[in-house]
Image (cartoon, rainbow, N blue to C red):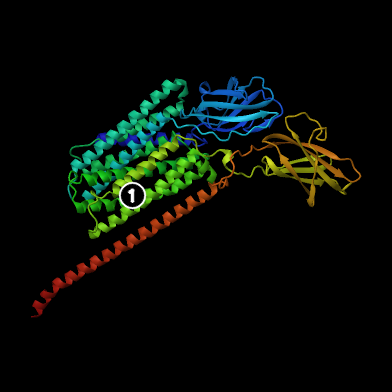
Amino acid sequence: MRSPLRYAVGLALALAVALALVVVGAAPPALAHAYLSSSTPPDGSSISQAPRSLELHFTEHVVLASTEVVVTDTQGHRLPASKLTLVGEDEDRESPSTVVAALPPLGVGAYHVTWRTLSADDLHESGGVLAFGVQSTVQAAGPSEADPDLLELAGRWAVLGALAAGLGAVVVGGLLVRGAARDGTPLRTPGLVGLRRLASRALWVGAAAALLVLVADLLRFGGQAVTSTYAVRWGARELALAVAAVALLPRRSPGRRAERGRGVVAAAALAAVALSTVLLGHTGMRGGLTWVVASTAHLFSSLLWLGSVGALTLVARRSRRFGLSRAELRVLLRRFAVPATCAVAVVAVSGVYIASDVVVSVDAALLTTYGRIFLVKLVAAAVVGVLALGTARATRATRAGTIESPGRAPRLRREGVGLAVVVALGGLLSTGQPATAPQLVTRDEPSVVDSRPVADLQQAVALRPNRPGATVAMVDVFDTRRPSPGPVTGVTVALRDGAGPATAPTTAGGPAPVAAEHVSGARWAAGLDLPTGGPVELVVTVHRRGLADVRSTVRWVVAPSTSVAPLVSRSPLAAPLIRTALLLAALCGLAAAILVWTRGRSRRARSTAGRVAAESDKTDSRAPEQLSRST
């Protein structure tokens, strides 16, 4: 291996180690784009007293200088919030953060809050609207979706296209080099040089596009918006793009060993590009190393598939320049079957796993822009899968010479166009807000139980479900003294506003207590109607024979209401999709094992047949000699 190649290998390994350290440091985050997870007051809540401040809880750290909060009343008067403060850990930790805005004095009525901020992790803008009422009912604004940044989208498409071109050149170039070594034929230098020259140029274009996007972000948001973590990841991706572009620079007289070594270096650098691109985009709700690995594998495999199909289409259209005959081109397509099958399997398994973390329910897929784009991408991927199956069947049929030349057939071109559409939609999704808003999924809100001693009793209270609307208060009352001084004869439960004065619930105008029904043993159940999400107080009164009533107040927080009406289903999809991904992985592993066993058996059978034929030839050659001797 030549010294420049050794230097490139060392550089690629150092880059891989650096990116691995970045991944380890980035394992804890939740989302790479900053989106609103909740607020205080909650969206759609009705409170008895005007709040003095507004809290916006974000999934990631935000740039305070680029954050704006405006409150608007029903008359359309804008009431800008003042004294914005940021609560959270260091921005390079990518931990969730909270923006606290001081509010002007608010009267009775409904208010809409418009907010806009900038993610400190990837310079992605996001914004939205929420509503709350002071002593008045208000409709929740519902989940907000930020419009994609067209400049960011263009830069991401350029990087993805460059990565696909580089992977295509590595895979198809490797197949050409390996085929020449296996068949003992000379290396097709002109075509290989042209293929790698195009890929190298595409990688330089991708690096330049990413640089232009960074310069534009600096001009728009200022240098203070770029954190050290973002700078390291962006710089790592630029370095990896440059290493891959240099490794793919064409050589006029390439040797097979040198070409293989440069292909390995380029592949390692392109894997680093995929990893850093993932770290600059979404990392899912769960986050962690598993998500990073799955997303990188999905991106790498899908772009390998796209780039390879594009490179094969180019080779088929210019087969004369590559020095390939029609038969050799068919062999090349058949050799691509193994990497293509592996890429498809990885894309399918990782794609299902990733979907479990970005689309929380069927309604989330149908009612959000992100979900609809995701569904279009899913349909496009299915169409591409059908086209790929047709191409594979046609390639197998070429052994019998039953179809026209692949260079003239449109199958590869259609498959390549379909894959380009899928990748473009993936780039669009990476700049959007995942369909993970709490309003889009039905969760079993607390099974939290408030258990405490009250006088000489032990009392446990739970609300099921803990959502606005009809619910059941489950009250368990246990007497701690033996024998019991008096049996429990009844339980009543009353609701009052948790932000209101600590007055008895039976005062004039207040809610009347609800008598609980005895269920079994020490358990009592009372039907209640919970108000809009927020703090409430449960006043529990236990009646006992011959003794004074025991009264206690339980402070409770009602989960926010769901503003999106169920369309099909809001049941969580995460668990079923993860099980599906595991099942697909198991099936792919089983199919691979069967294929390896079958091919091994076939090779052993051919080897045995070859030995038998050789022995038969030796026997036939000895027969005339033995006959002449006997004569």
Q: Residue 446, how many percent across, how many down?
A: 66, 42
Classify residue 446 as left or right of residue 361: right
Residue that sits furthest to the bottom in the current view: 631
Can residue 582 be seen here? The reply is yes
Location of mark 1 (residue): 339
Instruction: Kindly identify the residue that appears in the image at 31 percent across and 35 percent down.
Output: 244
Q: Residue furthest front?
A: 75
Tell me if residue 230 comes above or below residue 267 in the rendering.
above
| Numbered label tally | 1
Q: Residue at the spot x=49%, y=41% of the render?
A: 371
Q: Nearer the viewer, residue 441 or 410?
A: 410
For the residue pair 386 and 168, the one nearer the viewer reads as: 386
User: For residue 59, what is the image quadrant?
Assistant: top right
Q: Is residue 242 visible?
A: no
Q: Position of residue 125 (x, y in %)?
A: 48, 28
Q: In the rendered view, would you say 601 is above or below 504?
A: below
Q: Quadrant of the N terminus?
A: top left
Number of residues whose C-alpha sits closer than 10 Å to that of mark 1, classed few (under 14), some (14–19) or many (20 or more)? some
The one of 579 and 392 positioned closer to us in this rendering: 392
Please tell me whether mark 1 sits on a helix, a strand or a loop.
helix
Image quadrant where one finds the C terminus: bottom left
Q: Position of residue 420 (x, y in %)?
A: 35, 41
From the viewer's perspective, is 619 left or right of 517? left
**Residue type beneath disc 1:** Pro
Residue ID at (67%, 32%): 137
Residue 64 percent location from the top left of the image:
53, 23
Residue in the picture at 33% in, 49% down: 339
Report which quarter residue 277 is drawn in: top left
